[in-house]
Amino acid sequence: MDYKAILTQNGYRLSQPRKQVIELLQTSEVALSPQQIHQALQQKNCELGLVSVYRTLELLTELGLVSVVYDPQRNPGYMLSTVGHLHHIVCQECHKAIEFSASNDIDQLVQRVEQETSFQVLDHFLQLFGLCPDCHQKQIAGE
Amino acid sequence: MDYKAILTQNGYRLSQPRKQVIELLQTSEVALSPQQIHQALQQKNCELGLVSVYRTLELLTELGLVSVVYDPQRNPGYMLSTVGHLHHIVCQECHKAIEFSASNDIDQLVQRVEQETSFQVLDHFLQLFGLCPDCHQKQIAGE
DNA sequence: CTCTAATTGAAAATCTTTTTCAATAAGGAC
DNA sequence: GTCCTTATTGAAAAAGATTTTCAATTAGAG
């Protein structure tokens, strides 16, 4: 994903902190908290403040480059997102998360709920939890 | 709902703070934050500490009497829940929330995602946002 | 009514997130 | 490449939310 172009097109600079946060997220299969991001970058000798991590995540979320993904205890974390409105499934063991699309199923559900409730539905939040193939295998092997 | 029975059956006492929090929630159509609950009860001359509100909400959530419902900005709030695993639709204007059931639609979606992702799905979180009938009407009238 | 253990409240501790503001650095103009 | 403007950063402080601790209180069994 060309995050550089998206930043500049929206009038933002590609600063070191932004570059470092994005490059870290590119290597992570799990959603990371601001603190985790900060610590991971410190260990890589990237000298950036926790405040910048917060600011960077806020900006990237606003630009749609980053998604908020909740862990099984409903703590929010951050992941790079691909394009469009996608949802995530999160492993309850290792917290690995991947995206899935659900538009058709959701459309159907939304239609039914609109009829049932008389609400007009404009947005939704959906996330699944379960076991990734690896952790599922380990669980079977361990029993 | 017989919250008294549920508390005692699980070995908990029906203390004043618990009673007051539950009775307040029974009157609310919107999810309330711990602070909002605390303030509302103070104004009713119920002398209870904010800490007790937190502890009560934690317990009631654990017992399934209370659900966590997120507002449009994804801030968590608390509402009394009916029985079973239900979902909520929240009005983006007035934050009024009501429950809806979605098991059939969800089952179908879960099945498809399991095939697509090879994850085993065990739990899910779904919430809809939109306009309640009242706010929808107001919006139409205002345009 | 008494007694005991669960529960509470207040203060302190812990965390998380936001704000402030002077110092720094990105990137366009030359 | 250098200069200049202004976005961006970092550190400290402030603000907020949540948890822990522990003595005092109270629910409810006997």
Image (spheres, coloured by chain):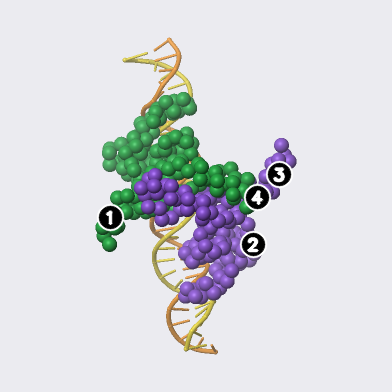
Chain colours: A green, B purple, C orange, D yellow
Residue linked to disc 3: B138
> Which marked residue is nearer to the observer: mark 4 or mark 2?
4
User: What percent of the width, then of the height, locates residue D21?
Assistant: 39, 66
- Which quadrant of the rendered structure holds the C terminus of chain A? bottom left
Asked if residue C22 is positioned above or below residue B31 in the image, the reply reads above
Which residue corresponds to the image point at 50% horizontal and 64% vertical from the top-left?
B64
Tell me, for residue B27, which label it has, or none.
Answer: 2
Tag 3 secondary structure? helix
Asked if residue B134 is positioned above or below residue A24 in the image, the reply reads below
Asked if labels 4 and 3 touch by Cβ distance under 8 angstroms, the answer is no
Q: Earlier in the sequence, mark 1 or mark 4?
A: 4
> Residue A12 is drawn in which quadrant?
top left
Q: Are marks 4 and 2 on the same chain?
A: no
Asked if labels 1 and 3 touch by Cβ distance under 8 angstroms, the answer is no
Which chain is home to disc 4? A
User: What percent of the width, then of the height, locates residue B69?
Assistant: 54, 54
Residue B141 lies left or right of residue B2; in this view the side is right
Tag 1 secondary structure? helix
Which residue corresponds to the image point at 55% horizontal and 48% vertical from the top-left?
A109
- Which quadrant of the rendered structure holds the N terminus of chain A? top left
Which residue corresponds to the image point at 71% horizontal and 40% vertical from the top-left?
B140
Three-letter code, disc 1: Lys
Tell me, for residue A138, which label it has, or none.
Answer: 1
Asked if labels 4 and 1 touch by Cβ distance under 8 angstroms, the answer is no
Q: CA distance from mark 3 to mark 4?
A: 14 Å
Tell me, for residue A118, which label it has, or none.
Answer: 4
Tag 2 secondary structure? loop
Mark 4, other Cα within 10 Å: few <14 / some 14–19 / many ≥20: some
Q: CA distance from mark 3 to mark 1?
A: 55 Å
Three-letter code, disc 2: Thr
Residue D1 lies left or right of residue A8; in this view the side is left
Looking at this view, is B15 or B67 the one in front?
B67
